[in-house]
């Protein structure tokens, strides 16, 4: 794990300072004056002057960096720019370069895992898609651990397998839903998880979740379990709303069952099967961790 701040310190600042030191020397600054202007030691200035500090070519070639170095050097030489203003101007540029720009590219180079996320993002943005995506994946992981660490969960897994899914706030399709690839299966009485959660790997549970959201419910997560009347009754006895739908209904059976009523933030959907259709129970909740906790508290 490498922070973008480390990229700034290790990749950007040495190059920027060496460029600025060189420009100041060209404007007649002594080594001592350069050190004072940059807030560094004279020995550091000497290293910059003798090329002893590694430089990033991408920073050297960036027009915005070149323009800032020239403006700051001119201002410091003329006395028009204070060290505080020089710092502020540099910080502004750094924030700009971190936002899906030069420094973001250098960060991705040093941490290739970031390349898995499409599009530009600002890693400091609390509302970034990256942060939201990672939080959803984290919630699904917690849900998986809650279920699979509970004694007896394997007995609740239907023949088609279980899955636990959570969607992004503005989910439109299954690519916006994170779940366990290949589902969770009962292998000799043990719940077996094939791999880490991913987006776009569930059709069954993700489809149920998205259909429930189409009916204007506020849920963002779902987990499927085997059906029997006792399972549904135990949820009802625990105070959770239970809603039956007909899987063989001609159109949108889940939407039809849920539309036109206010539903709690956590509730149970179920269907009792049909021709070639296994009976299944679904717990829907605000997030995957909550869905798993409800299952554990009520049934395990």
Image (cartoon, rainbow, N blue to C red):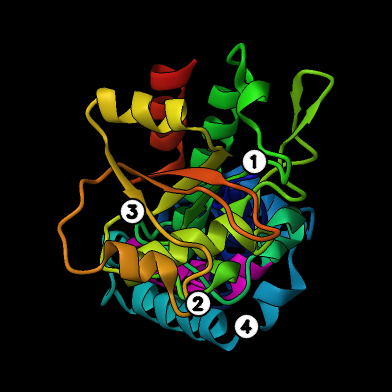
Label 3 residue SS: loop
* Nearer-the-camera pick, 6 or 185: 185
| Residue appearing at x 65%, y 64% in the figure | 200
Q: Mark 3: few, some, or many residues within 10 Å (few <14, many ≥20)?
A: many
188 w.r.t. 268: above or below: above
Asked if marks 2 and 1 touch (Cβ < 8 Å), the reply is no
- Residue at the right extreme of this rendering: 188
Q: Earlier in the sequence, mark 2 or mark 3?
A: 2
Of pointers 4 and 3, the one earlier in the residue sequence? 4
- The residue that disc 3 covers is 219
Q: Quadrant of residue 141?
A: top right
Q: Which circle marks residue 62 in the picture? A: 4
Measure how far apart labels 2 and 4 are at the Cα level: 11 Å
Secondary structure under tag 4 reads loop
SS label for mark 2: helix
The range drawn in magenta is 87-105
Q: Earlier in the sequence, mark 2 or mark 4?
A: 4
Using the numbered discs, state the Cα–Cα distance from disc 1 to disc 3 in whole angstroms: 18 Å
Residue 162 disc label: 1
Image location of residue 211, percent across then percent down = 43, 67
Distance between mark 2 and mark 1 Cα atoms: 59 Å
Q: Kindly identify which residue carries mark 2.
A: 69
Q: CA distance from mark 4 to mark 3?
A: 46 Å
Q: Locate residue 72 relative to residue 10 in the image: left or right.
A: left
Coordinates of residue 239 in the picture (x, y in percent) = 22, 28
Q: Nearer the viewer, mark 4 or mark 3?
A: 3
Q: Is the C-beta separation of discs 4 and 3 under 8 Å?
A: no
Closer to the eye: label 2 or 4: 4
Label 4 crowd (10 A; few <14 / some 14-19 / many >=20): few
Give above or below for 6 relative to 143: below
């Amino acid at each position: 794990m490498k922070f973008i701040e480390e990229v700034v310190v290790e990749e950007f600042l040495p190059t920027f300072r060496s460029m600025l030191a060189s420009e100041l020397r060209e404007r007649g600054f002594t080594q001592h004056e350069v050190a004072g202007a940059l807030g560094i030691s004279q020995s550091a200035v000497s290293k910059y002057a003798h090329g002893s500090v590694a430089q990033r070519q991408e920073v050297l070639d960036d027009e915005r960096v070149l323009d800032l170095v020239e403006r700051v050097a001119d201002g410091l030489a003329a006395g028009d720019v204070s060290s505080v203003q020089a710092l502020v101007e540099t910080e502004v540029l750094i924030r700009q370069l971190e936002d899906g720009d030069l420094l973001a590219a250098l960060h991705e180079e040093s941490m290739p895992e970031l390349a898995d996320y499409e599009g530009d993002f600002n890693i400091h943005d609390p509302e970034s898609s990256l942060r939201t995506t990672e939080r959803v994946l984290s919630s699904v992981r917690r849900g998986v651990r809650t279920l699979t660490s509970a004694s007896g969960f394997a007995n609740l897994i239907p023949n088609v397998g279980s899955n636990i899914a959570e969607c992004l706030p503005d989910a439109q399709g299954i690519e916006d839903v994170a779940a366990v690839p290949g589902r969770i299966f009962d292998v000799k009485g043990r719940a077996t998880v094939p791999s880490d959660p991913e987006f776009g790997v569930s059709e069954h549970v993700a489809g149920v979740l998205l259909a429930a959201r189409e009916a204007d419910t506020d849920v963002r997560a779902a987990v499927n379990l085997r059906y029997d009347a006792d399972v549904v009754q135990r949820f009802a006895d625990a105070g959770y709303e239970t809603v039956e739908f007909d899987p063989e209904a001609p159109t949108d059976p889940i939407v039809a069952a849920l539309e036109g009523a206010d539903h709690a933030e956590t509730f149970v959907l179920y269907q009792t099967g049909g021709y070639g259709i296994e009976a299944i129970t679904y717990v829907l909740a605000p997030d995957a961790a909550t869905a798993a906790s409800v299952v554990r508290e009520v049934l395990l």
